[in-house]
Amino acid sequence: MSVRDYDKLSKKIVLGKPIVVVICDHNPGNFKKTSIAKYGSLANAIKDRMQDLIPSCKGTDIVIGGHSASGEASLAAWQNGLIHDLNPLGYIGLDPYEIGENTIDEGNTLTLPAIFWGFTKTTCLVAKEKAAEAGYAITSSKARVLYTVHNENGCKITHCVFTDHGCGVKPFTCSTQDDFDWIYEYVACSIHLFLDAIAHGNTFTREYFELDGTPVDLSLRVNTDEVTLQDMAKGRLGSLQTKF
């Protein structure tokens, strides 16, 4: 993915909010985005040059994260102390991958408040149990949220639905469709709730993070709620209610 592939989501996140979204590429021109050293170096460089790049953001709070491989790189960079200049307030993981024993220190709990979006069905060769679900599992239970999109039973929503047009090169593609543009609004809404909760010191509760009206079923887990493959398979993770 490139920095130009997240315009739709970025616009929804900043619309009417005092928020700036910075989409950065720590390995431009290369498909592999898992280097924690490169992620850490770029993140620290952005922090150092914030006054020049975005003058109005000097001294503001920062949240880290990423989609797919960048989600893995950002989490691992934090675990390894490579984002030393940022002091992030939270983490946003859009189906971060791969979150497993070969990439992440599963014994090193993510103590930042964190929000994850994931799926009930594996797509784009991204094993669902090593993505958002795994990230949520290694996050402190005091301030964590997991939204799970039910994309089984013929639903064509994929791992790259957060991007403008999907990813990959035929025949190895992970596409998205205009019919799924609603995802940008709901992801943005959840991020607004997440950032407001952090800013105001609110306790993370299921009621606070509930949403409603999505064309596809979602499930929600908050704090001490655990995720099991059995619950996901049977669709028992809870319905979402209105919060607008």
Image: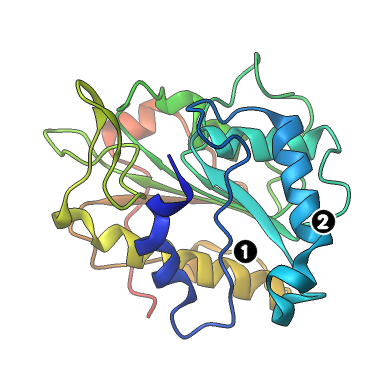
Q: Please identify the residue farthest to the top as the structure is shown.
A: 102
Residue occupying the point 32% across, 34% down: 120
Horizontal and vertical percent position of residue 209: 48, 65
Mark 1 Cα within 10 Å, few/some/many (few <14, many 20+)? many
Quadrant assignment for the N terminus: top left
Q: Secondary structure at mark 1?
A: loop
Q: Quadrant of the C terminus?
A: bottom left
- Categorize mark 2 by other alpha carbons within 10 Å: few (<14), some (14-19), many (20+): some
Q: Considering depth in this image, is 81 or 147 the residue closer to the camera? A: 81
Frontmost residue, 2 versus 69: 2
**Disc on the earlier residue, 2 or 1:** 2
Task: Please tell me which residue is depicted at 63% across the width and 40% down the height of the picture.
Answer: 26
Instruction: State the separation of the CA atoms marked 2 and 1.
Output: 23 Å
Contact check, label 2 and label 1, Cβ < 8 Å: no
Q: Is residue 217 left or right of residue 25?
A: left
Q: Quadrant of residue 215?
A: bottom left
Q: Name the kind of residue labelled 1 in the image.
A: Phe
Circle 2 — which element?
loop
**184 to 142, vertically: above or below:** below
Residue 83 spot, x, y in % from top left: 81, 45
Residue linked to disc 2: 86
Q: Is residue 110 visible?
A: no
Q: Which mark is residue 55?
A: none
Q: Which residue is mark 1?
A: 204
Q: Is residue 59 left or right of residue 11?
A: right
- Name the spot of residue 228 as percent of width and height, x first: 46, 30
